[in-house]
Image: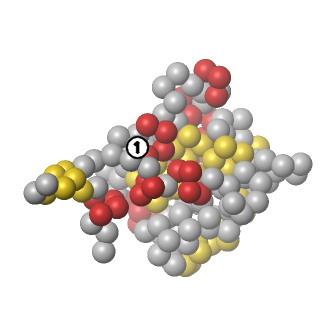
Amino acid sequence: LKSTRRTGELPDFISEFENLLLLDLDDNDFSGQLPSNYSMLDKLQFFLVNRNSRLSGFIPSEYDNLSSLRSVFLDTTNLTGDFEPLCKIANLNEPNDTDLDGKELVAADCGGDNPKVECKCCDICCKGQNCHDNNHVASLDLIWERRFQRFEFTIGNSTKYPDRDLAP
């Protein structure tokens, strides 16, 4: 649902998708707070709600249950406070100099002189509207988000990528 002009609060029913791996709500106009019941998405690996400038509040303490997370993009929002619940997750709590596999990525508004958030596990600390957008977009890079594998299949003589080539 990336860049689909969605508005309103983030829907609670998303927590019912127990096998959800990727939640990409980037670049919409969602408002309100992050639902605490998203913490039930224990298989979620990619949580992308960046560029929703009307999202506000804190990271729910229950989010430390999201032990499968590998990428979290929370930049260009109005979230505030300490991102400690996310930094408690073992996958995300590797300082850059000890991140052996390079597969985890956390981005938030933790840069500049007066950052909105405190994030000890962030790999990208943004300050302003243009954080990292095109550097980490699935459709622009064959290997998305720092070495994540992309699915492909062949039809006839051409290789197709479902996320890029078959989009409506």
Is residue 147 among the parts visible in the rendering? yes
Towards the viewer: 168 or 22: 168
Horizontal and vertical percent position of residue 27: 56, 68
Question: Where 129 sits versus 31, above or below?
Answer: above
Instruction: Tell me which amino acid carries mark 1.
Output: Ile
Q: Residue furthest right?
A: 113
Circle 1: element type? loop
Horizontal and vertical percent position of residue 40: 44, 49
Residue at 47 percent of width and 75 percent of height: 4
Horizontal and vertical percent position of residue 126: 72, 51
Is residue 40 among the parts visible in the rendering? no
* Residue where numbered disc 1 is placed: 143
Towards the viewer: 128 or 115: 128
Residue at 56 percent of width and 57 percent of height: 134
For the image, the number of numbered tags is 1
Question: Where 11 sits versus 143, above or below?
Answer: below
Question: Where 64 sits versus 3, above or below?
Answer: above
Residue at 53 percent of width and 63 percent of height: 26
Q: Residue furthest front?
A: 157
